Amino acid sequence: MTGERKRILVVDDDAQLQRLMQLTLKRQGYDVILASNGEEAIAKVISEKPDLILMDVMMPDMDGYEATKRIRRLPEGRNIPVLFLSALTQMDAKVKGLRVGGSDYITKPVHFPELLARIEAHLRTTLPPLGSLITLLGAKAGIGTTTLAVNLALAIRQQQSNAQVLVVDWRRPLGDVAMFMGLADPKTIDLILPQIEHLDEEVVTQMMTTYAEGIKVLAGSVDPENGEKMTLDALSTLLEVTLTLADYIIVDAGVFWDWREPPLVSKDVGMNICLVTPEITAIKRALLALQATAGEEYHLNFVLSHENLPGGIAGKQLESHLRSSVLGKLPYDPETTTRSMNVGRPVLQMNPRSRYGRAVQALAKNILAGV
């Protein structure tokens, strides 16, 4: 290293790992500051003004997420790169780390050459702001998540004319977003999956298909054999990159119960939307989804799909069953939505003043107010 020595704050309650990190970093020419908990880390940021922070996630009293949020509120900590080091590998753990103010997320056990390379990269660059993540799940199949995903992208862009919106089709094993948008021969995530562990912004950008101004698509798989590769870890890795490439990322994640661990995100990361139809089977599965996330830091926002379905349960009664008001109501408008799907043009392009089109626009306003 040349020039002024950079100062790295290592925050970890494991004394042995602290010593190992200190020795490794000093050999590379860095000055090392140590903190054993979140409160101490905040104090060291104020007094020592480090150039970079390596932050453990799981610590007693105050975890790394909360410590980072507080550091970001400090004038001294607003622009310091924070690299999370954690044994947690779930998608939400990684994406939450980025959303609360982290600059990177590295899973333990730490591979030191990779860690040193990332430290060097963060010390010489400033990362762009992160987008908001909107995950769409259905209480059961055939409920309209793909129809909502493509129209929601258009509605958000219409309401925020400078926003960059990305639709990620992660329905397993096959995706339909490209068909619903009339994309004839898009690049698909099948091209991404073999190199998922080595993704970067350049690779992902090359795989995106431009649909309209401000709207891009990562088209879903067309090879059913790739369904097993579409894991939660793979999606997490992809989202870590895409969060720096768009203001809003809409993930069509298919059916809630197709996942052993659904790709939910916490309030700090974005918004989870579960579509439910006014049918007893859909309501029962939505209640099971609610039960599965009870006590966690996730929140399920329900959207009623197929409102006024003949013979269906009334909206007020459905809200009573769910013990929650719904975020939006999408009308049962089969003539409009089926024709839209068959011609490959979203409703908001084909018939924006239809009942379905107006309902999506109203829902988009509620979502934008909440993310």
Image (tube, rainbow, N blue to C red):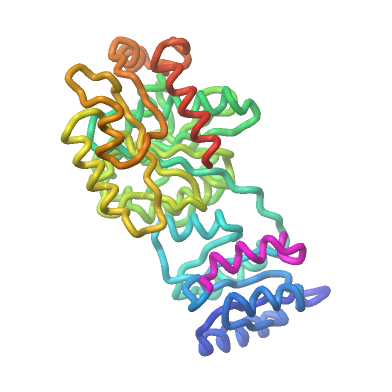
Residue at 38% x, 56% y: name it.
Answer: 233
Spot occupied by residue 55 in the image (x, y as percentages of width and height): 57, 72
Residue 222 shows up from this direction: no
Left or right of 291, for residue 146: right
Residue at 57% x, 22% y: name it.
Answer: 158
Determine if the magenta segment contains residue 235.
Answer: no
Determine if the magenta segment contains residue 76.
Answer: yes
Q: 286 or 160, which lies in front?
A: 286
Residue 307 vertical placement versus 223 (above, below): above
Left or right of 96, for residue 264: left
Left or right of 26, for residue 254: left
Residue at 34% x, 59% y: name it.
Answer: 295
Spot occupied by residue 75 in the image (x, y as percentages of width and height): 76, 62
Q: 333 or 231, which lies in front?
A: 333
Where are the magenta residues, as a range? 62-79
Q: 151 or 278, which lies in front?
A: 278
Residue 281 vertical placement versus 198 (above, below): above
Residue 142 shows up from this direction: yes
Residue 324 vertical placement versus 364 (above, below): below
Spot occupied by residue 1 in the image (x, y as percentages of width and height): 75, 75
* Total tally of numbered discs in the picture: 0
Residue at 50% x, 24% y: name it.
Answer: 154
Spot occupied by residue 211 in the image (x, y as percentages of width and height): 51, 24
Residue lying at the far right in this picture: please name it: 3
Residue 208 vertical placement versus 352 (above, below): below
